[in-house]
Amino acid sequence: MAIDFSALVERANAALEAPEQHSIIGARDGQSPRFDVYHAPFSVCSHKVRAVLVEKQIPFTSHDIRMNLVAHDAPCPDNYKPGYVRLRLQAAAGGALVHGFTGQSSVASEGLDPCVVPTLADREKEQVVVDSAKICTYLDQETDGTPLIPADLADAIAAQIALIDEAPHVGILYGASPSGDQRPERVAAGLSGVHDRKIKHLQALIAAHSDAPDLIAAYTAKIAKEKSAKSFIQEADTMVDAHARMKDHVIALDNQLKTHDGPWAMGEAYTMADIMWSVSLFRLKWIGLGRLWEDGDSAPRVNAYTARAFSRPAFQKSVINWPKSTPPSKHIEDTAPYAQALHETWRAIAARKAS
């Protein structure tokens, strides 16, 4: 049976009940954008996609997914709802669903998680794309403007993206370092017990949709992942390894920057590699691991690189200052030029709550 693509997208959209979760970004003359983008403000993979959209000034329909991870009494996450899950499953194409957890979030290494963000729906080609690296590459290839993946650098950029995908960002967000938890206190406290809360929601959804084999398969795979993730963060050895991998991650960029005299990862041109590295480094800075390049001389080129990368206007707009994207962190100083607008946003939110 042929799939009604528009109906599939609209069912996913209907699951996001609050009007403010939907907005059109960058469209001109009342045109409907080609792309629907499902993303969450704080998601590191969503950061990558938004950074590409804003850098290339690509119009899109924004769908703000409320993942509800921190509040212990929060309703079912939007990314677990049947309409959204079925949209993502269109990209599975018979591939393996996620079944375990390594601290990473790449579909290439982990399998398809049917219950996460980001997701791209291309209304023109009636295609669903998942995995942030694939979405970013797809957007670059399908739109006009200066390419972020120039043909002569495509292989080298792909190698950098693969390297960044191997970084265990999810693992170090959910779990504390055995040598001392540097995560922002409110986030660390809110994520306590998060895997059990996820599993509870998923079990309820399985019970509610017992006649839907596609959803049962998706939710069962997600439960297997969350059980594995819970074990991952509870094991001191895996968390020590995850943090060691992050140190290697930063050194890898420093070594790449040694190969030329240009300001960016590949040299003179700002490319997709820089978007991916900028997102990765900002998350590390926010979580308390900026010391990996700021202390001593272990990664001096990265130290200078971050100042350039975080100051880029498109990166500030799409990541640092995107609404609700960056919860407060003591590791981002008021004196940092790239964080000034961010702290103004925090103060404005606090003032509204107090009034």
Image: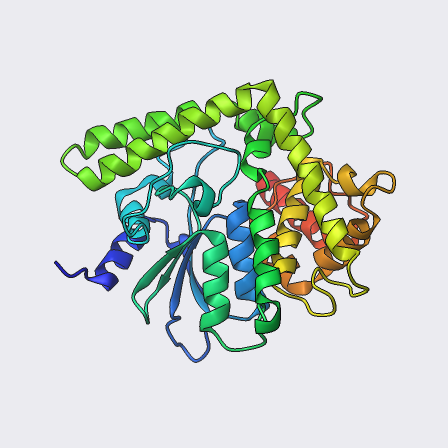
- Residue 238, by quadrant, is top right
Task: Check the image and report above or below for 60 versus 238.
Answer: below
Residue 312: x, y in percent?
70, 62
Query: Residue drawn at (54%, 37%), measured in percent from left and top?
Result: 170
Q: Is residue 325 visible?
A: no
Task: Check the image and report above or below for 23 versus 201.
Answer: below
- Residue 234, by quadrant, is top right
Residue 129: x, y in percent?
38, 57
User: In the image shown, does 328 or 171 lie closer to the viewer?
Assistant: 171
Query: Residue drawn at (45%, 64%), measured in percent from left and top?
Result: 138
Residue 201: x, y in percent?
33, 29
Count of numbered labels shown in the rendering: 0
In the rendered image, the residue lying farthest to the bottom is 29
Q: Quadrant of the N terminus?
A: bottom left
Task: Tell whether 178 sits left or right of 41.
Answer: right
Residue 315: x, y in percent?
64, 59
Task: Tell whether 297 sits left or right of 233.
Answer: right
Query: Residue drawn at (47%, 30%), measured in percent from left and top?
Result: 71
Q: Quadrant of the C terminus?
A: top right
- Residue 125, by quadrant, is bottom left
